[in-house]
Amino acid sequence: MTILRAAPVALLLALLAFAVLGPITNMLIWSVAETWYFPAKLPQSYGFSFWERVFRPQGNAMVSLWNSVVIALFTVLASMVVAVPAGLALGRGRLPWRSFFLLLFLLPQAFPSIAVHMNIARIFYGLGLNGTYVGVVLVHTIQGLVFSVWIATAAFAAVNRELEEAAANMGASPFTVFRTVTLPLALPGLMASAIFVFLISLDEFTGTFFVGVPDITTLPLLLFTASMEGNYQIASITALILLIPSVGFMLFIERFLKSDVLAKIGS
Amino acid sequence: MLTRKTSLILTAPAMALLGLLFLLPLGYSLVWAFRDEELGGWGLQNFIKAFGLYSRDILFTLIIVTLSTVIIGVLSIAISGYLTLGENRVAQAALRWMYRWPLFIPFVVAAQLMRTFLAKNGMMNNIIVSTGLMDQMHAVSYLDWRGIIITFVWKQTPFVALLLAGAMSSLDRSTIEAARNLGAHRFRILLEILVPQAATTLMVGLILSYVVMMSVLSVPLMINAQSPTMITVDMAWRINAYSDYGVANALGFISYAMTAVIAWIYLRQGVREGRRPA
């Protein structure tokens, strides 16, 4: 009886495993396939020569990887510079129409972003920002803005006010209270928002597609070009490089985003 | 701690960024859609041209995105329902571990995975052929509209299911237990107790997914860029090949409109339900 009941569940789980893990497995095989021609079901030979091509110091891929990391780091920096003060004000300050401001930052999520991106590219073209690091960093920052502002707001809102009052009562100046109490307590949440923004920037495609051309290639654009040229090994290895931080973040997200902060997001 | 003035000053840089890099280009996209750049002047020329050239793609986009949203909704109800009501702990743990994998995988990576997985000689067909359910002769490539839907569903279901499972697990267990004690089947509990109570979360997740799918460029470019294709591909093509911002912005305007219709239906639903006596 139990076997009869368990069988359909097991079958459905097997189907799900096939659907979720099958495409990932297929990519892993492609990334180590030396030669794989029609109609063979598995590669004729395996090897790492494409890895060597990807990681060759002067190769396209290393330049793209470097571009991606530099752009992502500067995007995190730019996001934090605007999101930490905004999060402090929205989380702890006395702001008129607070929920209106919060909703305003959600707005970019409510419109299909591609139409906005192509007009940013047109504006940037006039300013000479197309194909520059600054231009790409700005586009990535606006993509991540809702996450950085909302998570920073939640992180500051979750800080226990009594601790701040205790420090103030003992004679600490407002800035000392912020530096020694508020900021350290909000730091895990701010880290989570930084990691989120880093990933968004690393994975961003459409904005870079319009603004980065022709000079700036990031990993997603390299992956796209390699795939369209039919170079599935390079595309799969690039996909794998992008996959590792994404899946890692998924597995550890609960450690970065504590439930007390999560409960305050958007409230 | 912070005065109103300080709060406003602290928010100012973020607001300025939002204004310059989102509201301004958004405004331009709405204005330029009605601008005839060849002859000068204003009018609907861009829309007439956009509908003349791409009416099939507009319909195709609407069908793909709507169908994907419906499938994502059904699958995430099934997944979160089993996570909340399932009785087999092992199966629940396996499901919980597995369903979230695509959550943060970027669209461009998902598209590449599917490009190899769904091809005529891809792993999916190979495995189905190996199990004896189909012979090699009947293997077809899924890299067309079906491939786009499969990729969207694969990528977005974990997101909606994660939100929905969170909402369902925070519901009051006592009504579920009461229904169970009265002998209600699990499907009935799911559809008549859990889903209605978590409906707002489900709708928010689905609308966010709808907007995202409406603006993804990499998936249709990599899975199926031949006609008919999605209007995101057409927008990129108008700009890269012709520098035709007029028609591209008209298509962008149409994509806003398709999103607005969905949001309007949702809001109207909310108002109607709000009016009903509790």
Image: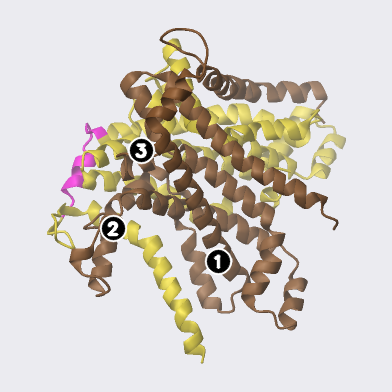
Mark 1 or 2: the one toward you:
1
Q: CA distance from mark 1 to mark 3?
A: 32 Å
Q: Are marks 1 and 3 on the same chain?
A: no
Q: Is residue A187 visible?
A: no
Marks 1 and 3 in Cβ contact (< 8 Å): no
Q: CA distance from mark 3 to mark 2?
A: 19 Å
The segment highlighted magenta reads A47-60
Outermost bottom residue? A1
* Chain B rendering hue: brown
Outermost right residue? A169
Q: Amino acid at mark 1?
A: Ala
On the image, numbered disc 3 is attached to which residue? A220
Q: Is residue A48 magenta?
A: yes
* Chain A rendering hue: yellow
Quadrant for residue B124, please give it.
Answer: bottom left
Chain under numbered label 1: B
Chain under numbered label 2: A
Which secondary structure, mark 2? helix
Q: Is residue B200 above or below residue A14?
A: above
On the rendered structure, is B34 left or right of A257? left
Q: Amino acid at mark 2?
A: Asn
On the image, numbered disc 2 is attached to which residue? A26
Residue A2 horizontal/vertical position (percent): 51, 89
Q: Is residue A2 magenta?
A: no
Q: Is residue A235 visible?
A: yes
Which secondary structure, mark 1? helix
Q: Is residue A217 above or below residue A128?
A: below
- Disc sitting over residue B78 in the figure: 1
